[in-house]
Image (tube, rainbow, N blue to C red):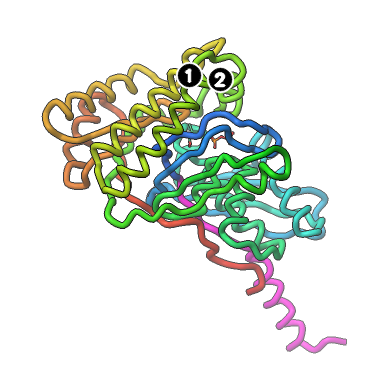
Amino acid sequence: MSTDHERGRGRRQAKVLDRGSTAVAHPNIALIKYWGKRDERLVVPYVDSLSMTLDVFPTSTTVRLSPGARADRVTLDGTSAEGEVRRRVVAFLDLVRELAGRTEPAAVDTRNAVPTGAGLASSASGFAALAVAASAAYGLDLDDTALSRLARRGSASAARSIFGGYALCHAGQGVGAAADLSSYAEPVPVPDFDPALVIALVDAGPKAVSSRVAMRRTVETSPLYEAWARSSKDDLTDMREMLSRGDLEGVGEIAERNALGMHATMLAARPAVRYLSPATVAVLDGVIQLRRDGVPAYATMDAGPNVKVLCHPADAGRVADTVLGAAPGCSVVTARCGPGARLRTAAGR
Ligand code: DP6
């Protein structure tokens, strides 16, 4: 028979285990974009990409093993997740369980400080946080490269959010297991370049076409896709050179042309995918006007209408005012380089 003291200790231990493993990750914005998969099942990109991890809009994810439960439980911002979101999280947990040789279901609780599905990289921070929290919860001891590879299976852009600052994601070589093994992100040390990224939230609602569907359609039907993928290689080489020089104008010009090229491939898809709205175009005009007025400012857009404007930190206020003038009613957040994904609480530790 157990004593009161032992029972008390058991309760305390159960409480510690109950806390699960919590990880925090930040979104990243690609300066050289990833668009298109060469292996959909393994989520392997066609092109290398390079991003800046942000210091805003973190995702916090807790994974708690529930050995007694019949199935995984997934909540997103306090609401039970269903459909595609739940399917992707459960598929990701299945992968982690396979790697760990475990079978217990889990409860996953995700809190996003960014509107989900609005082209603000919530899947990047989301799957980076989930990779770190789930691998800890299931007892996997993975280094950053393995975590990045794992996060990629959830969402390829998430591979980059494992790292802070700048990260390069390799499209990898070969097919099947070889492709999986060789596609991961790694940090790109850039000592002297800490620009501001003014984020214009012109529409925080969910996007009409998911990036997954849009990218497949682009690869399959856009006659411009291959040309963009080829030119992206040169963009990456030039980008690395400009980053190492800390040259904001150079970095900005390349990032803007690479993003506009990506959107051109989507516009040429059949049927066309158009994420850019009238408010997006108004902000782009504002950015051109800033440059005419001598303020170095450069735009990039992802799978949504929001615009991110790269500029010197000292110009961020003026850029924000211009954006607000161009798209009244939008909200503006200024980001800088942020940290990589980190475990906050490990189950039972
Ligand atoms: C336009 O990583 O969200 O933001 O791998 O299908 O989950 P999946 O796609 P996702 O695509 C992001 C595309 C992008 C450009 C980028 O971040 O590189």
Q: Is residue 90 visible to the viewer in this orientation of the structure? A: no
The magenta span reads: 1-27
Q: Is residue 272 visible to the viewer in this orientation of the structure? A: yes
- The reply to whether the C-beta atoms of the residues labelled 2 and 1 are less than 8 Å apart is yes
Label disc, if present, on residue 25 of the rendered structure: none
Q: Is residue 278 above or below residue 185?
A: above
Q: Disc 2 and disc 1: Cα gap in Å?
A: 7 Å
Q: For the point 28% across and 51% down, which residue is it? A: 193
Q: For the point 12% across and 32% down, which residue is it? A: 294
Q: Is residue 104 above or below residue 256?
A: below
User: For this view, does 323 lie left or right of residue 236?
Assistant: left
Label disc, if present, on residue 265 of the rendered structure: 1
Determine the residue located farthest toward the right in the rendered image. 1
Give 73 or 198, whichever is nearer the viewer.
198
Disc 1 marks a residue whose amino acid type is Thr
Q: Is mark 2 within 8 Å of ligand 1?
A: no
Q: What is the crowding at mark 1: few (fewer than 14 residues within 10 Å), some, or many (at least 20)?
A: many
**Membership of 13 in magenta stretch:** yes
Q: What is the crowding at mark 2: few (fewer than 14 residues within 10 Å), some, or many (at least 20)?
A: many
Q: Is residue 121 above or below residue 148?
A: above
Q: For the point 62% across and 38% down, which residue is it? A: 44
Look at mark 2 in the image and give the residue it sits on.
218
Residue 329: percent from left, percent from top = 29, 28
Q: Secondary structure at mark 2?
A: helix
**Membership of 148 in magenta stretch:** no
Disc 2 marks a residue whose amino acid type is Thr
Q: Quadrant of residue 16?
A: bottom right
User: For this view, does 325 lie left or right of residue 8?
Assistant: left
Residue 255: percent from left, percent from top = 35, 34
